[in-house]
Amino acid sequence: MSKIKCIIIEDEPLAVKVLSDYIAQVPFLELQETFKDAIHATDYLRHNNINLIFLDIHLPKLKGMAFLKTLTHPPAVIVTTAYHQYAVEGFNLNVTDYLLKPFDFERFLLAVTKVKTEEGKKQKPIESQEIKDFIFLNVQKKKVKILFSEIVYIESQREYIKIITTKKEYISKMSTHEIEGLLPANLFKRIHRSFIVSINKIQSYTAKIVEVNGVSIPIGRGYLDIIENL
């Protein structure tokens, strides 16, 4: 897949630097331009093909949400702000993700991986987009078929992951980032740097834990917004 071309619309120099540094660490991202206000970005978007916008809410001249409403065919948008109260409005405008400042690189990577997944779907021919309900994983030198409907949660164990299903547990040598990219985003969510849970298996949650099939799993500090937006 070709690189995802992105721009930053942000008036805080430190925030621009953080985003630029994060983007530079992700091989599939390519930063094209940065803008201090949305007016100049609007003109740029008229003449350039962009896949992703990192957008601050509180901008001079034209606010972020107002700017979004002016775009007829907007690219993917990741909102970056210190204000959580705009989350609902952002998701109503179909933003891909909503990053509350300050956010770490892992949370940033989670957001841009969503964009990569959606871009990959766009580039596939329609006939090749088969809907699968399972995954094959390497388990003890064998390829084991695991149904999505049976997965309860996945736990990171350094260079391995432990997959807990309704029937048994499996250990596979891969990272949580790798398995996350293979799971349907509408069925599974990462709620902690070490845990991915099945949305359908969530029984209850608080500000600190999610309960799945009777097991309490901690919510990472940077992931609470994911749970609240389910």
Image (cartoon, rainbow, N blue to C red):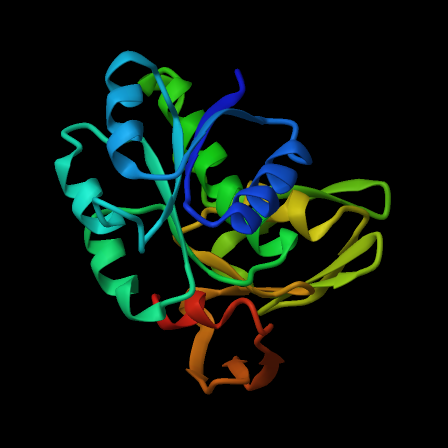
At a point 41% along the width and 67% down the height, the residue shown is: 200
Whether residue 77 is visible: yes
- Tell me where residue 53 sits by quadrant: top left
Image spot of residue 225 (x, y percent):
43, 68
Judge whether residue 145 can be spotted in this image: no
Q: Nearer the viewer, residue 16 or 195?
A: 16
Position of 138 relative to 5 (above/below): below
Query: Which of 125 and 116 lies nearest the eye of the viewer?
Result: 116
Q: How many marks?
A: 0
The image quarter in which residue 155 lies: bottom right
Residue 55 placement, left or right of 34: left
Residue at image x 39%, y 26%? 51
Q: Residue at x 52, y 16 (%)?
A: 2
Q: Is residue 169 above or below residue 116?
A: below
- Where residue 65 appears, as percent x and y from the top left, is 22, 50
In this view, the residue farthest toward the top is 47
Whole-percent x, y for residue 27 in the image:
65, 28
- Above or below — where is 212 with respect to 155? below
The residue depicted at 24 percent of the width and 28 percent of the height is: 42
Residue 218 in the image: above or below residue 167:
below
In what quadrant of the picture does the C terminus appear?
A: bottom left
What is the x, y in percent for residue 80? 42, 53
Left or right of residue 181: residue 32: left
Say which quarter of the image contains residue 52: top left
